[in-house]
Each structure stands twice: as C-alpha cells, then as structure tokens.
Amino acid sequence: MKYRDLLFSSLLVLFAGCSSSAKKQADNMTATTKAPKIEFNADSAYKYVKTQCEFGARVPNTDAHRNAGDWLIAQLKRHGANVIVQAPELKAFDGTVLKARNIIGEINPDSTHRILLLAHWDSRPWADNDNNPAKRKQPVMGANDGASGVGVILEIVRILKDKKINVGVDILFTDAEDWGDSNGDNENSWALGTQYWTQNMHRENYRPMFGILLDMVGTKNARFLKDYYSMQYASQLVNIVWNEATDSGFSNYFINDNGGGITDDHVFINRAGIPCIDIIDQNDSGSNSGFFAGWHTTGDTMGIISTETLKAVGQTVTNVILRY
C-alpha cells in the first residue's frame, strides 16, 4: 500500500459521513450492549504470524506463496469455517501474470447479518524502501506487512469456533495486494486480489454490515490513527472500534486523532458499497515512509512483532464482533 499524506486534515470534518453507496449498511452499525468477553490469545496469534514467515516471503508465483496458501486454507477448515477459494490470474503493473488466490472463510454461514474481516496474505516482491541499495531487489518477509493481520484474524477464527455468536463472520485473505507500483500515483496497481473480489464476490448480492481491514498490526508502539478514507466512508464504524479500544484499555494504541489517507484494500471495498475501515499502524517515527521503520524493507521480520500490539488489536476486534 502507499501512504497518501493529506495537508488539510480539516477536510475530514466535511467528509466524515459515509458515502451514499454505503449509507444503508452504515445504518445497521449500531452496536448492542456489551457481550460476555472472549479472551483473545496473543501468544497463539504470534505463532500464526511466525508460521507464515517460516514458509518464507509469500511472493506470488513462488513455492513459499503456494505452501502458505495451502496452510491458510487448512487452518480455516480446521477451525470449522466454510472455505471458498478464488484463483484468478492477475496482471500486475509490470506485466507479470500473478497466480493469485483469495481465500475466504465463512463462520456461522446461515446468519443474514454479517461482518467482514480481511487482511492481505502476500508479501512484497522487492524491499524497495530498504536503506541498503544492495537489498532493494530482495523480497520482503512481511511479518508485519501482511502476516500480522492474518495472524490476528486466524486467532479470532479459532476462539470463535463452537461459540454461539449473533452474527456471521466472513474472512477474506486477499492476495496480490503488495505487487504495486511505488513510482507515480497508480493506486490501481495495488490490492489486485481485492479489486478482483469486488467484481466477483463469493456470494451473490453479498452485503455485510461492514468490513474491518487489519494491516500492519504487529509492531511495538504501533499507533492506529483514524485513516482518512475510513472516516470518509465509515466514520460511525471508526468511532465504534476506537471507543471499544478505549473501553478495553488500549487507547495508547488506538489514538483519537486523524491520520493520512491510505491506498489499501479498504478503499476498493468501500467503492463496492461496503463500508470498511482500515486498522493500520501510522507510527512513522524513525521512518521517511509514513509507516513503521521496516516497511517494505528486509527488516520486516519476526523481530519487530509484539504480542502486546497483537493483543490490543485482536481483543478490540473480538469485542466489537461480540457487540452484534
């Protein structure tokens, strides 16, 4: 994904409401009273992140990518989800044909009221932001940028297994998110798997109440600011999630302040009429990228992953689900 810095943050006030295409779904976001708590296990989530990295960099068209995808499918099935796999061939901006897989899991599939959780599971093929020019053609392991969000979602799937919840939860592990053009302003070169899914949804007339995207949710001292596009399309949901984080004791991670606009999977989900927010680390201390210091570098490894941050995100999202 690409950071888009907005100079006039006051515009958020003007565009804080949801788009007209998402308005009907936004009306269904009112949460119920707080449900009994289910404990999110950050150590288990950490293991899910670690296992993904043990496959290697999950770059499309590689053995590591294929093996990791097979493992994700097996994990969703093991935890009782109904699994659907999309396998499109997607053409990247540089002409490479990517053998991609969007991996979808359905929890409580008979429920008509549904929540979408998503994260990208692929790794960037080049560490083009690395401080060492000699490493910029190496693939990115993507412990934080990709694997952390997937790990949190897998743990949510695990702890919801056999639990009686009021809503259905759909998991969307998107592919080919990170094979984008960092030169210029070609936002459509990113999130190719998500763009495919929005045109070929796994269920006819699929319309969940809302979606929550998890991206880069694992580093120590993460700062989750309110992304511009999340506020433009789904400000009510942003407030629900950030308030839940505060109530759960995680306000040091979920900062009550506006951030920049991120070109990420949620942008295309919103354009498809589904209100969706992005929980994404915008702690740019020690970085010129707008993100964590290891973003799109060879330093995005397990050494930067924090169980405390995984806990903050995982418990917050779990609590939000239990309110519906």
Image (cartoon, rainbow, N blue to C red):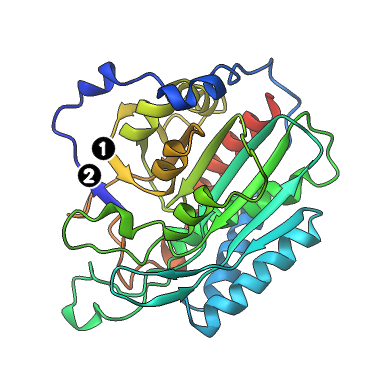
What's the residue at 44%, 50% (across, down)?
215
Q: Nearer the viewer, residue 38 or 142?
A: 142
74 on left or right of 154: right
Q: Nearer the viewer, residue 308 or 29?
A: 29
- Using a 10 Å C-alpha cutoff, classify the residue at mark 2 as few (fewer than 14 neighbours), some (14 to 19) or many (20 or more): some
Q: Position of residue 281 (x, y in %)?
A: 37, 45
Q: Position of residue 198 (x, y in %)?
A: 51, 48
What residue is pinned by disc 1?
A: 260
Looking at the rendered structure, the number of numbered marks drawn on it comes to: 2
What's the residue at 78%, 42% (across, down)?
109
Q: Amino acid at mark 1?
A: Gly
124 on left or right of 206: left
Where, quadrant-wise, is the C terminus in this rendering? top right
What residue is pinned by disc 2?
A: 4
Q: Position of residue 189 (x, y in %)?
A: 32, 60
User: In the rendered image, which quarter is residue 20 located in?
Assistant: top left
- Using a 10 Å C-alpha cutoff, classify the residue at mark 1 as few (fewer than 14 neighbours), some (14 to 19) or many (20 or more): some
In contact (CB < 8 Å): disc 1 and disc 2: yes
What's the residue at 52%, 70% (across, down)?
100
User: In the rendered image, which quarter is residue 72 located in?
Assistant: bottom right
